[in-house]
Amino acid sequence: AGTFAFTGAHQAGIVTPAQDRLYLAAFDVTAKDRDDLVALLQRWTTVAARLTQGLSAGPYGPASGPYDAPPDDTGEAADLPPAGLTITFGFGRTLFRTAAGVDRFGLADRLPAGLIELPHFPADNLDPARSDGDLVVQACADDPQVAVHAIRNLSRTAFGAATIRWTQLGFGRTSSTSTAQRTPRNLFGFKDGTANIKAEDATAVDEHVWVPASAAVDDPASAWLVGGSYLVARRIRMRIETWDRTSLREQENLVGRTKAEGAPLSGGAEFTEPDFDVAGRGGAPLIPLDSHVRLAHPDQNAGVQMLRRGYNFTDGNDALGRLDAGLFFLAFVQDPRTHYVPMQNTLSRDDGLMEYLEHTGSGLFAVPPGIPDGSLVVGRDGT
Ligand code: HEM
């Protein structure tokens, strides 16, 4: 893909087709007051609008402008195509109210009810240095250098107003968000994204991804978020070495799908709906009770679906020589209280895959709706 529109009803990087690469950064805001915060978001919006259209971060670019000043773009993407870059902004709970209850920017009455503190899930082993943050920026592109360039230049533009808290590089998308895309594979070697919400399914996107106008009726604080979404980020380490010594039978039973084709164990092909009632010899269901696909299926979750948009990661190795690798789970949902927390509780408790997984980082962010043409600042709500 070349470029995606930066302005529109929704931010790009959600239902736009998932690119191959990710660089995501969470920031702590150091701005002193609301004006400084607004100025930061204004600068970010202007820079993001340029970068996503294949322009340099500033009007001069990396190699012109005042000779005695630093260039207004760092330069490493100068000769590269835009590579489908999308930049998606989100706000963490602490932007509205710190953990100690301080309202730094006069935003406490805008804290959407869904922007909760996520509960501790069974087996969570979260590193605070890889969790949370006041702001998040998700940069996706088909070229890692383009995604890194975007975050680097936004971070540079944030000087004095926000500092990076944690970042995550991702390679190899682990879901497809369009029926036009081939289903990719995660580091367990299984197809991932088969039953994901696809952009073409407008009804499912409306029902499960965008914050509906009705949310603001119950919760006026979330009026500014209508047409936006919530982003759940979970850094999930995989116990790759143990997995690689597990039999193919066990691997397929844990997932509930075949490894080759991604077909449900109840039969059919990749896109056949799983049938959870079909039993094999001995009476046990062909899709085991503790399999991931059974426990994550809408039938087991009050009909809820999510738009998954995660990436594989590998961040070197630990002292025992094991890869620090896994799946950086990203999902966009219309309300984490209904569309994420119950499912994660079930999975963390009962999913057989959990034996091979460890959640090491976490974040929840409110993702404002799109930036209207001519508007200068992401998240603006008219006040
Ligand atoms: C489906 C793997 C974590 C929610 C799947 C599938 C695989 C998979 C292979 C089947 C293909 C597909 O439909 O996409 C993994 C791995 C994970 C992980 C390896 C962790 C490293 C999660 C988490 C959640 C989740 C944390 C949500 C809390 C889902 C959902 C489906 C799914 C909703 C579709 C179920 C359906 O409708 O059939 N996952 N997943 N997954 N997963 Fe995960």
Image (cartoon, helix red, strand yellow):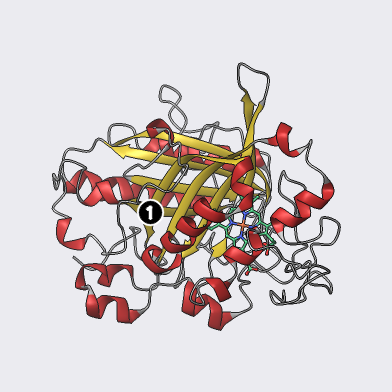
Query: What is the total number of numbered labels drawn onto the structure image?
Result: 1
Mark 1 belongs to which amino acid?
Phe
- In the image, 289: left or right of 164? right
Picture coordinates of residue 166, whole percent (x, y): 44, 34
Is 224 in front, or is 124?
A: 124
Q: Check disc 1 and report the residue beneath it.
A: 365
Picture coordinates of residue 224, whole percent (x, y): 28, 68
Q: Secondary structure at mark 1?
A: strand
In the rendered image of this protein, does residue 213 appear above or below residue 340?
below
Determine if residue 76 is in view.
yes
> Where is residue 202, by image quadrant?
bottom right
Is 169 in front, or is 348?
A: 348
Circle 1 crowding by C-alpha within 10 Å: few under 14, some 14–19, many from 20: many
Picture coordinates of residue 92, whole percent (x, y): 32, 50
| Quarter of the rendering occupied by the N terminus | bottom right
| Residue at position x 68%, y 39% in the image | 79
Is 365 in front, or is 90?
A: 365
In the rendered image of this protein, does residue 37 appear above or below residue 269?
above
In the rendered image of this protein, does residue 68 appear above or below residue 71?
above
Which image quadrant shows ligand 1? bottom right
Picture coordinates of residue 102, whole percent (x, y): 13, 44
| Quarter of the rendering occupied by the C terminus | bottom left
| Residue at position x 44%, y 35% in the image | 130
- In the image, 73: left or right of 341? right
* Outermost residue to the top: 319
Determine if residue 16 is in view.
no
> Where is residue 366, by image quadrant?
bottom left
| Residue at position x 59%, y 54% in the image | 351
Q: Is mark 1 within 8 Å of ligand 1?
A: no
